[in-house]
Amino acid sequence: MKKSRIYRVLKIALIGTLAIGIFGFLTMELWNWLMPALFGWHPLSFWKALGLLVLCRILFGGFRGGPGHGMHWRRRIRERWAVMTPEEREEFRHGLGTEVGLCPPEEQAAKQ
């Protein structure tokens, strides 16, 4: 049982290392193919490409987990929607439509 656990950890570490290497290589190749030709920027080394991936992950993705993490607001909206009356739902839809421009122009003009 202990050997299977060690085997699993080594397998995950190998796959993770391989994935990081592949993503770093792909980032480096795409950068070196596009950026110098389009913008005249300098080519990247493999290690700079990995650094760029980490920086993008920090700035845009975070290190919190898989997809859907932090989407707890959807659950709250569904809970609120479940307890709304039909009139409240229609009012909510109408209010949302005017906020994002989904209502017909004559309705938007009438509200203003």
Image (cartoon, rainbow, N blue to C red):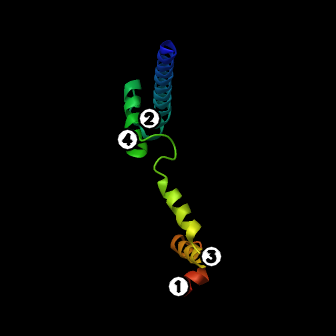
| Residue 46 appears left or right of 109 | left
Which picture quadrant has residue 97? Answer: bottom right
- Looking at marks 2 and 3 on the same chain, the residue that comes earlier in the sequence is marked by 2
Q: Is residue 73 visible?
A: yes
- Read off the residue under disc 4: 58
Task: Determine which of the numbered discs, if any, sits on residue 111 in the image.
Answer: 1
Tell me the residue at 50%/60% (across/down).
Answer: 76
Could you tell me the amino acid type at mark 3? Pro
Task: Determine which of the numbered discs, if any, sits on residue 86 in the image.
Answer: 3
* Secondary-structure class at tag 1: helix
Q: CA distance from mark 2 to mark 4?
A: 25 Å
- Read off the residue under disc 2: 36
Q: Is residue 43 visible?
A: no
Q: Mark 2 and 3 residues: CB-CB less than 8 Å, in contact?
A: no
Could you tell me the amino acid type at mark 2? Pro
Could you tell me the amino acid type at mark 1? Lys
Which label sits in the foreground, 2 or 3?
Answer: 3
* Secondary-structure class at tag 4: helix
